[in-house]
Amino acid sequence: MSIAIGALAFAVLNLISFYFISAHAAWLSGLIFLVTLGLLLFLISFFRIPRRNLSTGDDLIVCPADGKVVVIEEVVDEEYFKDKRLQISIFMSPANVHQNRNPIGGEVVYNQYHKGKYLVAWHPKSSTENERHTVVIRNPHGELLVKQIAGALARRIVNYLHVGQKVEQSAEMGFIKFGSRVDVLLPPGVSVQVQLNQVVQGGVTVLAKWA
């Protein structure tokens, strides 16, 4: 939908430019074309969904998003678990694919949207103060919390899941528009497979393994 709206805006603006500007200021009409074409190409690139060989496995927890690992630390979760969890956070720049995927397969047992601020995505308080959408998926190994967090530019979080839904590992979970972050809260004792500052791919890179 966003790409269709962008393409329509591109066509309308350039038709107006051609009929009302080009005859008097061809350079301005050409500039409008180049700028709007650049914006359209960026929009298409941003919403791209590349074909990938997805990682699946009963013992695997895969990355829910493209980006860079910016946090690996123990935290106390106040929203759902009410105890200590291992948090791994992935920062997504505007250049990353912004499709989010299920890190594990199982049943959705919690789904909650929270209004909030728009701090930069790497801010320590963005996990608890920014606009965010939290999902918990349960399977025989345990429960996993995934939090989609809006950043300073991201102003819309899309989440396709609902409580009671059975989901497949690495299937699409949702989307965040324009620069954002995804937190995963893991049970203590899992075997972490990534490192700080590592570049990861959603649905491909193995984030951790169940103990």
Image (tube, rainbow, N blue to C red):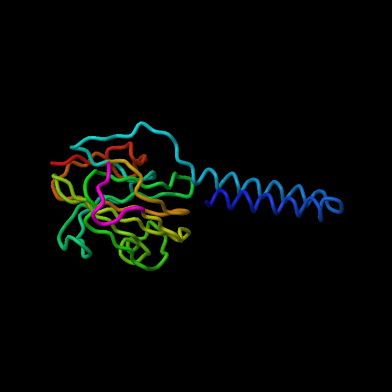
Q: Is residue 201 magenta?
A: no
Q: Furthest residue to the right?
A: 24
Examine the residues drawn in magenta and state their main secondary structure: loop
Q: Furthest residue to the top?
A: 53
Where is the C terminus found, in terms of image quarters?
Answer: top left
> Which residue is depicted at the point 29% across and 62% down?
112
Residue 110 at x, y percent in the picture: 24, 58
Q: Is residue 78 above or below residue 85?
A: below
> Which residue is depicted at the point 46% across and 61% down?
155
Q: Is residue 164 magenta?
A: yes
Bounds of the magenta span?
Answer: 160-168
Q: Quadrant of residue 203?
A: top left
Q: Is residue 132 above or below residue 47?
A: below
> Which residue is depicted at the point 14% across and 50% down?
188
Q: Quadrant of residue 190?
A: top left
Relative placement, left or right, of 74 versus 89 is left
Nearest to the observer: residue 96 or residue 165: 165
Relative placement, left or right, of 21 versus 89 is right
Nearest to the observer: residue 104 or residue 94: 104
Numbered circles on residues, count:
0
Residue 108 at x, y percent in the picture: 24, 53
> Which residue is depicted at the point 18% across and 55% down?
85
Residue 157 at x, y percent in the picture: 41, 58
Q: Is residue 93 above or below residue 62?
A: below
